[in-house]
Image: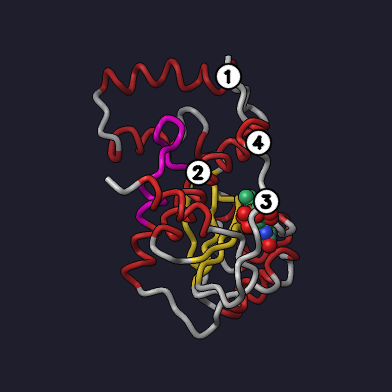
Amino acid sequence: MIDKQAVLQAFNFRHACKTFDPERKIPDEDFRMILETGRLSPSSFGFEPWRFLVVQDMALREKLRAVSWGAQGQFPTASHVIAILARKEDMRPGSDYTENFMRNVQKLSDEGIARRHTFYPQFHETDFQLQEPRALFDWSCRQAYIALANMMTAAALIGIDSCPIEGFNQRNAEAVLNEAGLLEGGRFGLAVMVALGYRINPQPVKTRQTLEEVVRWT
Ligand SMILES: Cc1cc2nc3c(=O)[nH]c(=O)nc-3n(C[C@H](O)[C@H](O)[C@H](O)COP(=O)(O)O)c2cc1C
């Protein structure tokens, strides 16, 4: 197990890095490790509603930058950019995606699948009310953000900087990705992006509310 102070040090080291050193590239092994922490992230029902699209094509990055006010300094300088895509209609109960997932990825027994056929629709219809396409996509996105957080923390733990990017026009950014054939005809939407690399400027002072302000005990 890793030392507690080392974990906190990584959380303090991580900041929203606005400009990266364009000369420094993340070694393949390190980048793979970061992706692996995304892959191993938890998701609701374990259905992994994400895809990690690594955008190394600078022309595509430039097109995305044009519709991303929050990534002006990050996209041209980052060693790597990941667009985290989230599934849409695939997440509905009874979809080919979920059925195939239960059998071939999760390897559930027939009994396990039958149980899911009861409570997964109930979760969608009653518990979380995911009937609206936007509600469904947002639910996928919430899970994509868990993978985002894990990848940023993993990066910080090995001395790599990052910046989460939500500063984009979703419709326009999705149009760019769709035109490049990367959304599988609307099967995926764009949840969030993250730029990774090495800082070129000193880190600003971190500001946060105190623990007393953000925690309530009952
Ligand atoms: C989901 C999400 C989206 C964000 N989008 C952007 C962005 O588009 N551009 C940017 O420069 N920072 C972005 N940020 C960074 C936040 O502004 C930053 O995390 C916050 O101000 C706290 O600062 P710190 O991360 O440096 O501690 C985003 C953060 C999160 C969590």
Give coordinates of residue 96: x percent, y percent: 42, 37
- Residue tagged 3: 207
Q: CA gap, disc 3 to disc 2?
A: 22 Å
Mark-to-mark CA distance, 3 and 1: 23 Å
Q: Report if residue 41 lies within the magenta region.
A: yes
Compare marks 3 and 1 and give the one earlier in the sequence: 3
For disc 1, the neighbor class at 10 Å (few under 14, some 14 to 19, many from 20) is few
User: Residue 201 appears at what percent x and percent y?
Assistant: 61, 75
Considering the numbered disc 1 on the image, is that residue within a helix, a strand or a loop? loop
> What residue sits right under mark 4 in the picture?
133
The quadrant of the picture occupied by the C terminus is: top right
Frontmost residue, 6 versus 186 = 6
Q: Which residue is drawn at 33% across and 23% down?
A: 113
Q: Is residue 67 left or right of residue 202?
A: right
Label 2: which secondary element: helix
Between circles 3 and 2, the one closer to the viewer is 3
- Sequence-wise, the earlier of marks 3 and 2 is 2
> Could you say whether the residue bearing mark 3 is in a helix, strand or loop?
loop
> Which badge, 2 or 4, is on the more N-terminal residue?
4
Q: Name the residue under label 1.
A: 217
Q: In this view, does 191 lie to the left or right of 48?
A: right
**Magenta range:** 36-49
Q: In this view, does 189 lie above or below 23?
A: above
